[in-house]
Structures are given as C-alpha cells and as structure tokens.
Image: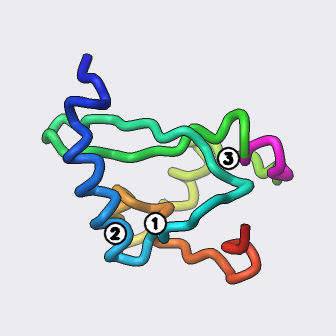
Amino acid sequence: MTSTLSIKEKIDKELDRLEQSQIIEKVNASDWSTPLVTVIKSNGELRLCGDFKNTLNNCIEDEKYPLPTIETMLGNLGGNKIFTKLDLSSAYHQIEMDEASKIC
C-alpha cells in the first residue's frame, strides 16, 4: 500500500491539471468539503475521488430509477446495426454543474 505522502507530488500535479481543465476550482472554504481518496490505477496514473458518504451524500435526495435487466437491454438491442463504445473514464467530469450548485 502506498502512503499519501509518498505520492503528494503526483496528487498536486493532478489537482493542478483538473484546475487548469476547469473541472475543479480553488476555494477558501466550503460547506461541501470532503476527504480526498487517492486510487492508483493499474497504469500508474492517479484517480482522485471524494469520500462523500458522511458529507454530501446526506443532503442528496435519491431518485429511484430501477436499472433494466440484461434481458431487457439485450432485447432492446435486437435488430440494431450500429453500436458505439463510450469512454466514461472521467464521466462525472463531463457533466457541468449549474451556477447555483457551485456556490458554497
């Protein structure tokens, strides 16, 4: 297991990259702050995650939407001729928050 201190430079570099890409922005304080969880991917890159279980998750209203079964999904694909492959490696970074949600 790798300690956070041993990869601090990589974490800082990734935070800088996310800020430059306007995915995150620095703030002095926030009601929504949460612990940072660092995962080292198999290719050696970092995945930075927030541990929201004790912070933001308590404020989210669940939308109950049952996922379709594999049988339903395969049934819906029958007869189709064109398919696609989506890269969702940073899927949550592709959804922009509205301005009201960004305010602390």
Q: Is residue 101 magenta?
A: no
Q: Please say which color scheme the image uses.
A: rainbow
Question: What segment carries the magenta color?
Answer: 56-62
Q: Describe the element under mark 2 as helix, strand or loop.
A: loop
Residue 85 visible in image: no
Q: Earlier in the sequence, mark 2 or mark 1?
A: 2
* Quadrant position of the C terminus in the picture: bottom right
Q: Amino acid at mark 3?
A: Leu
Q: Residue at left 80%, top 51%?
A: 60
Q: Which mark is residue 93?
A: 1
Q: Residue at left 69%, top 53%?
A: 32
Which residue is nearer to you in this view: 91 or 12? 12
Q: Describe the element under mark 3 as helix, strand or loop.
A: loop
Q: Describe the element under mark 1 as helix, strand or loop.
A: helix
Which residue is nearer to you in this view: 57 or 65? 57
- Residue 85 percent across, percent down from the top left: 32, 64
Question: Which residue is tagged 2?
Answer: 84
Q: Label 2 vs label 3: CA separation?
A: 20 Å
Q: Label 2 vs label 1: CA separation?
A: 20 Å
Note whether 44 is above or below 31 in the view shown. above
Q: Residue at left 67%, top 58%?
A: 30
- Residue 97 percent across, percent down from the top left: 63, 75
Note whether 17 is above or below 39 in the view shown. below
Q: Is residue 59 magenta?
A: yes
Q: Residue furthest bottom?
A: 99
> 83 left or right of 24?
left
* Quadrant position of the N terminus in the picture: top left
Question: Which residue is tagged 3?
Answer: 67
Label 2 packing within 10 angstroms: few (<14), some (14-19), many (20+)? few
